[in-house]
Amino acid sequence: MAGVAGGLPEDLQAVVQGPELPIAVLDDDVAWVSGAAQIAEEEAIAENTFEFHFSFGLGSGRLEFGLAGLAVGDDNLEIPAKDDLVFPVAVEVVDLKPDVIIDHHPDTGVKAPFLDIRPNYGATATIMTEYLWAARIKPSAKLATALFHAIKTDTHDFTAQTQMEDVKAFQYLFRHANIHLARKIEQADLRLDYLKYFKTALQAMRLRKGWVFAHLGPVENPDICVIMADFFMRVSSVKWSIVSGTCDKKLVIIFRNDGIRKNAGRVAKDSFGQLGSAGGHKTMARAELSLSGLKEQIDYRDAAKLQLWIINRTKKKS
């Protein structure tokens, strides 16, 4: 398997010799989060060297992003409560200065003693699988299942940005994963209390020549915007799906498209990069803007005005 050879990188080993290591996982895939937690909790590489602390969107100050989804269990699926999490987390990440950042999204300029950012990879889970391979650690069934599902999710079943490294990692994990459990995870990707947002999204939907825009207003978790954006892409006439919502004093905008001569990351960055964090891949992207910084731009408390503002900025830059 390419990418990491001959054991873990020496500079990574040097960084992780302390008793406690904050790691920023800049990803939005709950399967990857669960898998990374399993590494810290179960695998020998973490037993005597360091423990993992997690943040989602460096500097965002949010804990629940991605944690309200599915947790991998031996025989069932559980939705963990915040106080019931079985792995260490960084509750407040505003001032977090990670020693290690591993990611597959474009480099945003965040600094750390050890950086492994590979924007050409389809999934962060692929990088972590290569680390396990290099360290000659056989993943447990739960860990392999989590990483297996994360690669499938991030690459959209290998229809989105994918490298041969993603395919090789997937093939390796397939031999160790619980496929029955992976299938259950795929089929149970909705929480009951999320169903109300489908009604909100359909009522807010604005369709313009293959573009769907929907502003959901306040949401309890940004993942809801992701679910709705993916949902609209299942409509045959939809070429672009852009769903937004407010959460934790931020405006979150999710971009999806059909991948035909389009670049979601560029549109997101050009439309909102000057106002906050924005970027992504050709078919998937995200923008996060502080609500306090939008006061001079738009009355974000007026959902209709905010949605029209998002539409106008996006269409102007597309």
Image (spheres, rainbow, N blue to C red):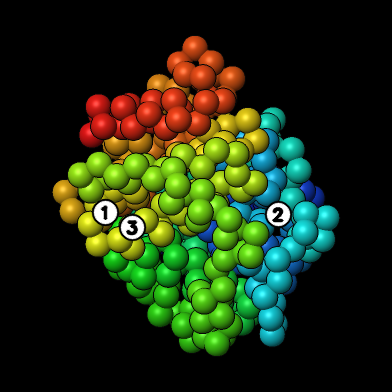
Residue 300 vs 54, above or below: the answer is: above
Crowd rating for badge 1 (residues with CA inside 10 Å; few <14, some 14–19, many 20+): some
The spot of residue 268 in percent (x, y) is: 35, 36
Q: Which numbered circle lies on residue 24?
A: none
Q: Nearer the viewer, residue 4 or 188?
A: 188
Q: Nearer the viewer, residue 20 or 250?
A: 250
- Amino acid bearing label 3: Met
Left/right of residue 188 with respect to residue 22 in the rendered view: left
Q: Which of the 4 quarters of the picture holds residue 151?
A: bottom left
SS at mark 3 in the image: loop
- Cα–Cα gap, marks 1 and 3: 6 Å
Name the residue that disc number 1 marks: 238
For residue 275, say whether it is visible: yes
Circles 3 and 2 in contact, beta carbons < 8 Å: no
Crowd rating for badge 3 (residues with CA inside 10 Å; few <14, some 14–19, many 20+): some
Name the residue that disc number 2 marks: 52
- Cα–Cα gap, marks 1 and 2: 40 Å
Residue placed furthest toward the top: 296
- Identify the mark nearer the N-term, 1 or 3: 3
Q: Residue at x 83, y 55 (%)?
A: 83
- Identify the mark nearer the N-term, 1 or 2: 2
Q: Which of the 4 quarters of the picture holds residue 180?
A: bottom right
Circles 1 and 3 in contact, beta carbons < 8 Å: yes
Left/right of residue 128 with respect to residue 36 in the rendered view: left
- Amino acid bearing label 1: Val
Name the residue that disc number 3 marks: 233
Q: Residue at x 31, y 27 (%)?
A: 312
Q: Which of the 4 quarters of the picture holds residue 264?
A: top left
Q: Residue at x 29, y 36 (%)?
A: 267
Residue 163 vs 214, above or below: the answer is: below
